[in-house]
Image (tube, rainbow, N blue to C red):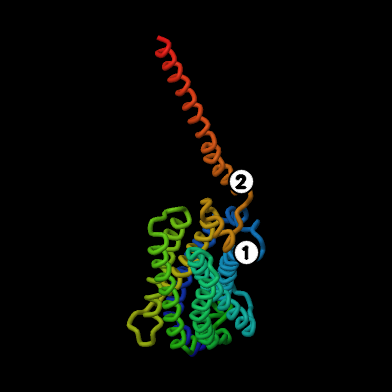
């Protein structure tokens, strides 16, 4: 073999060793996420598919879930050795498609939590416009900056080691890490704002309430926000140019993709199963329609106290009449004596 090729391969071995560790880290996360999706497929079919097409909960659920599947599948095609022949333009297109899918996953997953904020605020139009403006005002700049960062990553022809190991695509490193850092800080600010608004809303409006919707949002939403904030904080440190904090194997990226998708998915499924009569109306207008069977069971349960309230005065009246008859009879007996 040509000595120059040997020297090139030898110089690249440490890079490929690190890349292999990253691959198996990603594979563990992808396996866990696909396993979770398989476990919840029955809930998806029974709870989500029957919903109206344009119901917001259905749109967010399906977009987040299937964008994540597309994203993971494309990363497996691009990053794993399978000795398939893919042209440089095709690698470019697949890479951009994967980046768009990843942006959709992260954006729609967090939109789920903002929708929960809207539900907590009672679904009033003024809150809807405020939340939409705040969410888009922070999301659009982050998406644009992140897109400029990933667009600077170009596909290039395979090198010798890529060809020998069977990697189908090769990419240059992104050239704008400063834009990625700014985007990360904007996303961190967006998530922090939503957490603060959610905590204030829960404390002011629902401090003394403990129905099922509040329990779901506290548990699932709380885990989502706190885990996401912690991971975003360290992601900001890692993405900051010149920062001593490094994430050589993209552990933060892997954990964030796992937690964001699982908890956003669980939150929507749990909200669909909320059966409190006091909260079904709000959720039905915002997120999901509840089926008629659950509605009829709730109405039947609600009717029973009303029947009891009608019967109770009758029993009390009968008791009063009986009492008067008894006392009247006793009085007449005494009067007769």
Q: Disc 1 vs disc 2: which is toward the camera? A: 2
Residue at 51%, 88% in the rendered image:
2
Say how many tags the image has. 2
Residue 12 placement (x, y as % from top left) = 45, 83
The x, y position of residue 239, in whole percent, is 41, 82
**Residue positioned most to the top:** 337
Which label sits on residue 55?
A: 1
Question: Which is nearer the eye, 80 or 144?
Answer: 144
Give me the residue at 54% from left, 41% from top. 306
Q: Which mark is residue 296?
A: 2
Mark 1 or mark 2: whose residue is earlier in sequence: 1
| Residue 209, quarter of the rendered image | bottom left
- Mark 1–mark 2 Cα distance, whole angstroms, equals 22 Å
Question: In this rendering, is residue 327 above or below 286?
Answer: above
Identify whether 155 is placed above or below 210.
Answer: below
Asked whether the residues under the numbered discs 1 and 2 touch, taking CB atoms below 8 Å apart as contact, a structural biologist would say: no
Q: Relative to 50, say whether 307 is above or below.
A: above
Measured as percent of width and height from the top left, residue 110 is found at: 50, 70
| Left or right of residue 47: residue 189 | left
Residue at 57 percent across and 74 percent down: it is: 101
Is 264 or 152 nearer to us in this picture?
264
Residue 90 shows in this picture = yes
Q: Residues within 10 Å of mark 1 (few under 14, many from 20)?
A: some
Tell me which residue sits at (53%, 65%) in the image.
Answer: 123
Check disc 2 and report its element: helix, strand or loop: helix
- How many other residues sit within 10 Å of disc 2, few (<14), some (14-19) or many (≥20)? few
- Where disc 1 sits, the SS reads loop
Q: Position of residue 117 (x, y in %)?
A: 48, 67
Mark seen at residue 102: none
Q: Residue furthest left?
A: 244
Res 80 visible: no
Q: Quadrant of the C terminus?
A: top left
């Amino acid at each position: 073999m040509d000595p120059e090729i040997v020297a090139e391969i030898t110089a690249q071995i440490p890079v490929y060793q690190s890349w292999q560790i990253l691959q198996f880290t990603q594979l563990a996360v992808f396996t866990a996420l696909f396993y979770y999706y398989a476990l919840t497929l029955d809930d998806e079919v029974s709870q989500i598919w029957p919903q109206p097409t344009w119901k917001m909960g259905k749109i967010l659920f399906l977009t987040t879930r299937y964008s994540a599947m597309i994203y993971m599948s494309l990363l497996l095609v691009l990053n794993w050795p399978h000795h398939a022949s893919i042209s440089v333009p095709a690698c470019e297109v697949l890479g951009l498609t994967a980046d768009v899918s990843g942006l959709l996953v992260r954006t729609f997953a967090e939109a789920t939590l903002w929708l929960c904020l809207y539900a907590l605020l009672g679904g009033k139009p003024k809150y809807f416009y405020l939340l939409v403006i705040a969410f888009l005002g922070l999301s659009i700049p982050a998406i644009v900056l992140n897109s400029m960062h990933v667009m600077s990553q170009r596909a290039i022809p395979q090198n010798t080691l890529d060809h020998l190991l069977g990697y189908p695509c090769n990419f240059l490193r992104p050239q704008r890490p400063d834009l990625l850092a700014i985007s990360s800080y904007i996303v961190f600010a967006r998530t922090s704002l939503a957490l603060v608004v959610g905590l204030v809303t829960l404390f002011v409006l629902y401090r003394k309430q403990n129905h099922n919707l509040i329990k779901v949002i506290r548990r699932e939403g709380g885990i989502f926000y706190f885990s996401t904030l912690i991971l975003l904080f360290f992601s900001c440190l890692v993405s900051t140019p010149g920062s001593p904090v490094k994430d050589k194997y993209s552990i933060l990226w892997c954990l964030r993709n796992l937690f964001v998708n699982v908890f956003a998915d669980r939150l929507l499924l749990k909200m669909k199963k909320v059966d409190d009569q006091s909260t079904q109306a709000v959720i039905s207008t915002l997120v999901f329609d509840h089926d008629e069977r659950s509605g009829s069971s709730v109405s039947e349960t609600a009717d029973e106290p009303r029947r009891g309230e009608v019967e109770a005065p009758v029993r009390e009246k009968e008791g009063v009449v009986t009492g008067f008859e008894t006392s009247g009879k006793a009085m007449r007996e005494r009067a007769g004596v």
